[in-house]
Image (cartoon, rainbow, N blue to C red):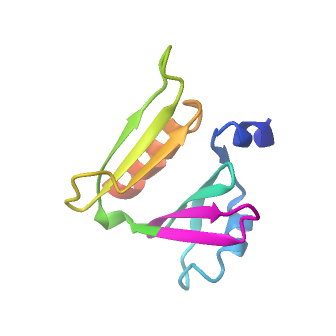
Amino acid sequence: MGLFSGLLGNASQKDVEKVERQLVDILIPNERVNLAFSLIRDLIIFTDYRLILVDKQGVTGKKTSYKSLPYRSISRFTVETSGHFDLDAELKIWVSSALEPTEVLQFKSDDNVVQIQQALASAVLQ
C-alpha cells in the first residue's frame, strides 16, 4: 500500500535512519532527522533545526532541489483537509512576513497531512 499511496500523492512515512544516510552531505554535524515522509519522489523531512523539502526533478530524478526552512523563520501555516467534492488536502507554509505562501504541498488524502501538521506545529511552536 505504501508504494501505491505514494503514486497517488499520499505521504508515507520513511525510515529516519535511511533518510539520514541519504542526506549525509546536507545535514550539519549533530543534526538528526526526527521524522520523514515521502510524497511520490519528493521528501518532507523534519530535523532538529529545520524543515527540509527535497524535490527530485526531471525524468530520472538525478537533479535534486533541497529547500531548507529553519523553524524560527516559519511564521504560519495552514492545513486544508479534503471534502466531498475537493478530494485534495493541502498544507501551506509562510516564511517571515511573506504575503504569499512559500510552499504549498498537495496531498490526495488527509491520512498523513494531519501528522505532518502536528510535527510542524510541534517544531515551530516550541
Q: Quadrant of residue 73?
A: bottom left
Q: In this view, does 72 lie above or below 23?
A: above
Q: Main secondary structure of the magenta part?
A: strand
Q: Which of 39 and 24 is in front in this view?
A: 39
Q: In this view, does 3 lie above or below 49?
A: above
Q: In this view, does 75 lie to the left or right of 51?
A: left
Residue lying at the far top of the rendered structure: 84
Q: Is residue 24 visible?
A: yes
Q: In this view, does 2 lie to the left or right of 114?
A: right
**Residue 51 x/y as whole percent:** 47, 63
Q: Is residue 59 magenta?
A: yes
Q: Note whether residue 126 is visible.
A: no
Q: Farthest residue in the front direction? A: 59
Q: Residue 5 is drawn in which quadrant?
A: top right
Quarter containing the N terminus: top right
Identify the residue at image location x=49%, y=32%: 89
Q: From which residue to which does the magenta span run?
A: 48-67
Which residue is at 73% across, 61% downward? 59
Q: Is residue 125 magenta?
A: no
Instruction: Provide residue 115's location: percent of width, then percent of height.
Output: 53, 41
Q: Which residue is drawn at 47% across and 19% down?
A: 83
Q: In which quarter of the image is residue 118?
A: top left
In percent of the image, x 72 and y 57: which residue is there? Answer: 15
